[in-house]
Amino acid sequence: MIHYLEGTLKEKSPSYIILEVNGTGYRINIPFSIFEHLPSEGKKVKIYTYLHIKENGIALYGFLKPEERDFFLNLISLSKIGPRSALRMFSRASPLEFKKAVMEKNLTWLVQTPGIGKKTAQRLILELGEIAGERLPSLEEEGNIQDGIAALCSLGYTRSQAKEAIKKALEKNSRIKENLTSLVKEALKYV
């Protein structure tokens, strides 16, 4: 996983940016809500990324804050919501405003968001509300733990199954969190 990219903003549009890093230009899809917060072209910027790989292509998604990317990862871990859908959802508001609406169970606000109908909004409140409301410092602070949970979710496990497996793996060996591959391998024994 590419955790972040730091370089010169060569081009920006409401849906993507071109970021030059050491002579290579990366096309990074962004939510519209961060467009106005980007620096002007030619300036340095740090973008927290998610690399999405599937059979017919590779896409890079970017955010200005790691919390925004983490919430995006939580969102795409839900069934029937892919990265493009999640990005459309963030076109109306920042990921943090979106999270607030989920926490407040604001169904009316959510259904006004592009790509979200009543059933999807109810599912988001139910499934994502649990994720958004959790504050487990040991799990929130460590990047490898979050990446491990995301990896297990991408293998088809639910977020709660992934978290439980990671917890059990850490109970067996707390130092395992220093190596993402080892953490995921150990966690797979508990799902």
Image (tube, helix red, strand yellow):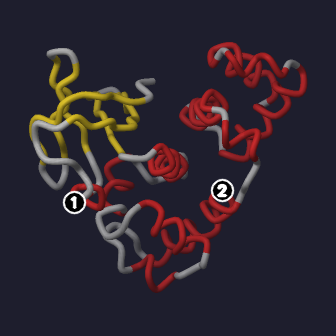
Task: State which quarter of the image contains the N terminus.
Answer: top left
Left-right relation of 47 to 157: left
Question: Mark 1, residues whose alpha carbon is within 10 Å: few (<14), some, or many (≥20)?
Answer: few
**Residue 79 visible in the shown view:** no
Amino acid at circle 2: Ile
Check the image and name the residue furthest to the right: 172
What residue is drawn where x is 70% and y is 37%?
A: 162
What residue is drawn where x is 17% and y is 18%?
A: 24
Check if mark 1's residue and mark 2's residue have beta carbons within 8 Å.
no
Amino acid at circle 1: Glu
Check the image and name the residue furthest to the front: 43
Residue 77 screen position, x and y as percent: 54, 46
Judging by the rendered image, the residue that carries numbered circle 2 is 131
Describe the element under mark 2 as helix, strand or loop.
helix
What residue is drawn where x is 54% and y is 34%?
A: 154
Residue 111 screen position, x and y as percent: 41, 79
**Residue 71 visible in the shown view:** yes
What residue is drawn where x is 62% and y is 36%?
A: 146
Residue 39 screen position, x and y as percent: 20, 48
Question: Mark 2, residues whose alpha carbon is within 10 Å: few (<14), some, or many (≥20)?
Answer: some
Task: State which quarter of the image contains the C terminus.
Answer: top right
Question: Quadrant of the rendered structure where residue 143 is?
Answer: top right
Question: Quadrant of the rendered structure where residue 139 is?
Answer: top right
Cα separation between marks 1 and 2: 28 Å
- Seen from the viewer's position, the closer of residues 78 and 88 is 88
Describe the element under mark 1 as helix, strand or loop.
loop
Judging by the rendered image, the residue that carries numbered circle 1 is 36
